[in-house]
Amino acid sequence: MRRILAAAALVAAACSSPRGGSEAPPLEFDPLPADPHSYSRPNDARVVHMRWTWRPDFDARTLHGVAELHVRRRPGVRVLTLDSRGLVVERIGAGPTDAHGPAYPHRVGAPDPVLGAPLEITLPPSTGDRVDALVVTVVYRTSPDASGLQWLEPAQTHDKSAPYLFSQAQAIHARSFLPCQDSPGVRFTYDGAADVPERLTAVMSAEGIGGPSVRAAGRRFYFRQERPLPAYLVALAVGDLAFRATGPRTGVWSEPGVVEAAASEFRDLEAMVDATEELYGPYRWGRYDVLVLPPSFPFGGMENPNMTFATPTLLAGDRSLVSVIAHELAHSWSGNLVTNADWSDFWLNEGFTVYLERRIVERLYGVETATRQAILGRNELAATMDEFKDRPKLRRLKTDLAGEDPDDGMNSVPYEKGCLLLVLMERLAGRDRFDPFLRAWFDAHAFRSASTAEFVAFAAARLPDVVARIDLARWIDGEDLPPDAPEFDRSVFAAANAAARDFAEGRRAAKDLGAASWTTDEWLRFLAAAPDDPPASKLAELDAAWGLTGRGNAEVAAAWLARSVRAGYEPSYARLEEFLVGIGRRKFLKPLYAELLRTPDGRARAEAIYRKARPGYHPIAQATLDRLFAEAR
Ligand code: BES
Ligand code: ZN
């Protein structure tokens, strides 16, 4: 009985709004370790809830926001420090207008190129000797070049009928559109509303509540995110959007002209959620929807809670690229539920998620498909390790990113080396022990962040025999791929490998490759296995037999186009330009431009294409490519 009462009290505490009131739980918060990528001081004062109303001005490329921050602070603390980048603060006080009492003095510190600027707000004095609660309302607007927002003209969208706005906050871009404690350890709930022009629809990393209400100058959409999340998972998008259900709790959002293709490509969404629940416990976020963005979206996918953001380049027509969706869904456990303590622990988000992704793929599409993708990933890791041979620090699982842009830590090391470590543990433990172990990890840290050291301690306590057989220090802090890195059954690529060998050595003509039934993954393996410098005549032969320049599958196209540039295969260049101008996914852009930059003639082409394409790229992609062009000089 006492246990039941205690549980009821916990539930009541968890459900009661953090906005104060008589039923408020005792005001406290756990200490957090320092985060080198945030100016905020969450151990002094902590944002626990936000009521956010925002309004895009498409003409001025400015987001107007009122962020009502519900703060808890320790006794004696007089300053709330938030992260910001390029924000124009209009007023800060207890409420949005003068009617809500006096303004709170504030100061914006000197901006740092990576971190932005601290926004220091002087709070009224605290009384008493306990943690207290207060509301700090920031009225502000964003700058037109906010790094976390992309504003699109109608011409840059699929349907070309309406403007579009979307955010991308990971790793530290939330601060460019929201004054916040932009550190993955700080979690808050949020709710609020978006005022958007007539005909446009707003979505967020939250659940929409009710339909929009009609207002004088447009429509107002309402949102609520009841699960506490870190700032990097706050997301919004506005455009001409339509919805199709793919199941009772899943669906797709996109421009109307894309929504049927999206619903068909992602028709397995509901089954994916079910499969992941069977492996790792309940999906704790309510609905799971996917927003398919315009082509300038700089990533494959982004795990915004309730609303994965995805590139339209996943719409291959044959579901061959849905592992990216499995990946973003998996983040609902690894990353969103249990979050890396700071960005040096990024592998805890991504390595776990790649591992989960492949388990989901195995459940839905079979062990052969999962194995092929594991091999492609392992090969990519080998290439990355090689690329970093002069910067061996980048080969470490746990990184040291202090003073650097955490976005620079996004490469296959945290993803694939991290995944390999988990595969190794799985093989030593056996799935019958490893699956419950991972589930327990998620349960034990749900809605909290965790560090690499905490993971090691957890593993040592629960799987001591496994940990005893692994040199974890070498895996985590070492600069090589340890010799016990798992291998996979490479016979799944026997056909593609043999075809590549025979074709390179002139034993088989292109038309005799037997590739008619190849999957996307087999094509990717074949193209990667080709020798480094095949003559253009070989590519012409392949193209004539298999129509590679005309392929719509973006992964195959990108691999083929890189090969074409390397070989100087002219007939692909028109397609290359169309691809580079039309698609903004950084993973494709960077290697293709890099390939062009290897020769003077290529450089001239790259510069001409980039001049045309750059205005349509996302700020994050622009920054990466500006650097690539500068470094290749
Ligand atoms: N969370 C990442 C995207 C990300 C990482 C954005 C770091 C900004 C900074 C997302 O889950 C991801 O990993 N996307 C991958 C696809 C995945 C299948 C490897 C991508 O976009 O390529
Ligand atoms: Zn990821």
Image (tube, grey):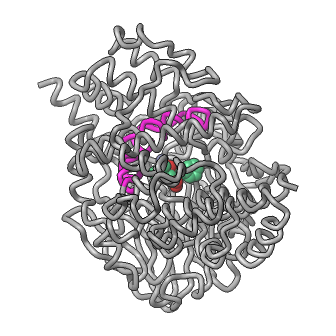
* 310 to the left or right of 593: left
Q: Main secondary structure of the magenta part?
A: helix
Q: Nearer the viewer, residue 493 or 163?
A: 493
Q: x and y percent of residue 480 in the render?
A: 61, 23
Q: Residue at x 30, y 27 (%)?
A: 440
Q: x and y percent of residue 34 in the render?
A: 65, 30
Q: Nearer the viewer, residue 121 or 64?
A: 64
Q: Residue at x 41, y 52 (%)?
A: 328
* 590 to the left or right of 111: left
Within the magenta stretch, is there residue 240? no
* 484 to the left or right of 37: left
Residue reaching furthest to the front: 507
Q: x and y percent of residue 612 in the render?
A: 74, 79
Q: Residue at x 76, y 55 (%)?
A: 105
Q: Which residues are magenta?
A: 323-352
| Residue 99 visible in the displayed image | no
Q: Quadrant of the C terminus?
A: bottom right
Q: x and y percent of residue 529 in the render?
A: 52, 47
Residue reaching furthest to the left: 1
Q: Quarter of the image holding residue 409?
A: top right
| Residue 420 visible in the displayed image | yes
604, above or below 344, in the image: below
Within the magenta stretch, is there residue 337? yes
Q: Nearer the viewer, residue 217 or 38?
A: 38
Q: Quadrant of the N terminus?
A: top left
Q: Quarter of the image holding residue 520?
A: bottom left
Q: Residue at x 62, y 20 (%)?
A: 478
98, above or below 592, in the image: below
Q: How many marks?
A: 0
496, above or below 319, in the image: above
